[in-house]
Amino acid sequence: MRNGAELARRLGVRLHTHGSETVEEEKFCHELFGMGPTDYFASTGWLGEDVWMAHCVHMNDSDIDAFARTKTGVAHCPSSNARLAAGIARVPDMLAAGVPVGLGVDGTASNESGELHTELRNALLINRLGAHREAALNARQALRLGTSGGARVLGRADQIGSLEPGKLADLVLWRMDTLAHASIADPVTALVLGAAAPVTASFVNGRQIVEDGRLLTADEDAIARATREEARRLARIAARG
């Protein structure tokens, strides 16, 4: 861990890992190192503005203070955490303390969906099941996690995350005039809490990559076929083992 942090800083790249995801991890760290995950990260140089962690579900007040003090980022993965029954991250407390928080999907091994709308919705809903209840997050705060919050976590707030002069032309356009959204007065609430809205267009640095929900830069059908074949191959290998 120490060597990895030193190498990353020598090369000028950011550090990322998963942290404080499960109670088993917490127990393991205390048994092996005599401290919790956050203190262990601190002891190895893995806290700082150039670091971001996925999950951070089991964080006490001291842990949150350490993240806020060092500006260590958090990728909140609500769907994966619910899928694995890992718990509810204290996102409202992190935001109140000044911790940079964005959204993540984790991965297909623990989240069968890799799209961000589900995370917007679940970040709002799941956090309202926690101690703060309806005061935990609102629709605009959830959307901010998926835009400017993520940009800050990645150390790119000066380039992406909002529409401003001088930033990269990253833009997504959704159709909000569908039957599924017609009865929701506020468009932000419709986007976050409503059904997944069709993507009319998506641009990355001014280059259009999605049109009417389809990738323009790759053959989706070919990728899907190859993915199915590989998934079946891996399942056969696992069955033999």
Image (spheres, rainbow, N blue to C red):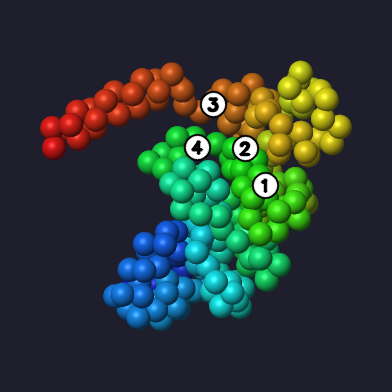
Q: Amino acid at mark 4?
A: Gly
At 64% from the left and 21% from the top, the residue drawn is 212
**The N terminus lies in quadrant:** bottom left
Q: Are marks 1 and 3 in contact (CB under 8 Å)?
A: no
The earlier-in-sequence mark between 3 and 4 is 4
To which residue does mark 4 refer? 114
The earlier-in-sequence mark between 1 and 2 is 2
To which residue does mark 3 refer? 215
Q: Amino acid at mark 3?
A: Leu
Give the x, y percent position of residue 113: 49, 35
Residue 147 or residue 236, whichever sits in front? 236
Image vertical order of residue 22 relative to residue 105, above or below: below
Disc 3 from disc 2: Cα separation: 17 Å
Disc 3 from disc 4: Cα separation: 15 Å
To which residue does mark 2 refer? 117
At 66% from the left and 65% from the top, the residue drawn is 93
Q: Amino acid at mark 2?
A: His
Going by the image, does 115 lie left or right of 169?
left
Give the x, y percent position of residue 226: 33, 24
The earlier-in-sequence mark between 1 and 3 is 1
Give the x, y percent position of residue 39: 44, 78
Q: Amino acid at mark 1?
A: Leu
Give the x, y percent position of residue 81: 49, 49
To which residue does mark 1 refer? 124
